[in-house]
Image: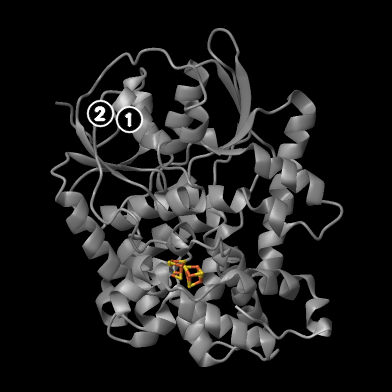
Amino acid sequence: MQTTFSLAQLADPHVAEAEKILRKCVHCGFCTATCPTYVTLGNELDSPRGRIYLIKDMLENGRPADAEIVTHIDRCLSCLACMTTCPSGVHYMHLVDHARAHIEETYRRPIIDRAIRSVLAQVLPYPARFRAALKLAALGRPFAPLFAKVKALKPLAAMLAMAPRAVPAASAVSTPATHVATGVKRGRVALLTGCAQSVLDPAINEATVRLLTRLGVEVVVAEGEACCGALVHHMGREEAALAAARTNVDAWTREIERGGLDAVIITASGCGTTIKDYGFMLRLDPAYAGKAARVSALAKDVTEYLASVDLPEPSLKPGLAVAYHSACSMQHGQKITRQPKDLLKRAGFDVREPKEGHLCCGSAGTYNILQPDIAGKLRTRKVANIEATGAALVATGNIGCMTQIGGGTAMPVVHTVELLDWAWGGPRPEGVGDR
Ligand code: SF4
Ligand code: SF4
């Protein structure tokens, strides 16, 4: 694609990066067929190619974002299916991240939208605040149907509807500690305990620590570790996202210097995509660029790491049929497709792959709160495909997908690592029956 940025515009490294990406697009439109919002809404402006044109026009003309571009960029799930499909290697993720930051800087959203986004940014990344908010949600739940009738308040209704009725107790695994390996130590990793996941489902990190230590891997929960920054990053709040990235880079660099790390283990693929991008996000910060690139290189999804470990025979082969849902951040963001399925098969599960596996379930960070109508349609479609497999349960590697899919089906939805922990000697995951 031809671009007409001026030399003065290209002096801004963010614009220069965007220009490089735009020039790679050859307008072929292959990406439209796999874009969930295009498939759902049928509007070219809600396709990757349409959004690329909108972003190009905004940036080339150096103009502030307007309501039209905000509408179409807000509807983008950042699922990155378009990046998997694109034959030209267009890095849509970096382009849309920059567009979101530009929107945040130049566009004043309506007051209710601003307020809801501020609450999400101030609550979700902080486990204590999030826990308190979930408890408060119980009081607000009766008003959800009322809020759902007012367009601007639909996100509030979605938040209340999604809040679990019971909040699990805080887990000891979420506090900084070193979990010693059982038997001969054969590795040392840091575990990102995360923010929302550690509150909604602490059993995931508990299973991870149990399984890794049982396999001889020492697991460190680093002092000072925080939310990965993905939630604010996807809202265009760049400074907050970079601050979160620096905090984690510092925490894991201290652990690298203290005892060495073979990997930084991530159990939520949404976080994994962002941490693997820290090197890019902090590339312009001379104090952090090198350290961030090192952390990104160490970042591994738990299944990616387990696939590199010499596993013994599982102690139990449950033999259940499992529908494996590959989160977008897993398959498109990190290109991890084979390892989770191979591990589940190795553990004796009958792995079934739902149709349209490339399409997002509608979770996408805060998307199911901010765009509840589109998210609801995508969930209905995803759940129908999952249920059609006839599997007994669903496994996935991202807490957002677990919450989104779990809200639309009676099937148990668990994290892949919980099933692996079970097969290799851990307890049966809650809600999962055996044969
Ligand atoms: S990230 Fe997903 S929703 Fe956004 S343009 Fe690409 S395919 Fe469409
Ligand atoms: S598939 Fe790639 S090159 Fe083709 S229109 Fe989409 S982004 Fe552009």
Quarter of the rendering containing residue 91: bottom right
| Mark sitting on residue 47 | none
Nearest the eye: 168 or 9: 9
Does residue 123 lie above or below 223 as drawn?
A: below
Find disc 2 in the rendering and name its residue: 349
Q: Is residue 200 left or right of residue 17?
A: left
Q: Is residue 236 visible?
A: no
| Mark sitting on residue 344 | 1
> Mark 1 vs mark 2: which is more N-terminal?
1
Nearest the eye: 123 or 332: 332
Does residue 312 lie above or below 340 as drawn?
A: above
Q: Residues within 10 Å of mark 1 (few under 14, many from 20)?
A: many
Does residue 425 lie above or below 409 as drawn?
A: above
Q: The C terminus is located in which quarter?
A: top left
Nearest the eye: 27 or 200: 27
Q: Is residue 212 left or right of residue 358?
A: right
Furthest residue toward top: 183
Q: Do labels 1 and 2 touch, CB within 8 Å?
A: yes
Q: Secondary structure at mark 1?
A: helix
Whole-percent x and y of residue 28? 46, 73
Q: Amino acid at mark 1?
A: Leu
Callout 2: CB less than 8 Å from ligand 1: no
Q: Amino acid at mark 2?
A: Phe
Quarter of the rendering containing residue 189: top right
User: Which residue is located at x 25 percent, y 58 percent?
Assistant: 382
Q: Secondary structure at mark 2?
A: loop
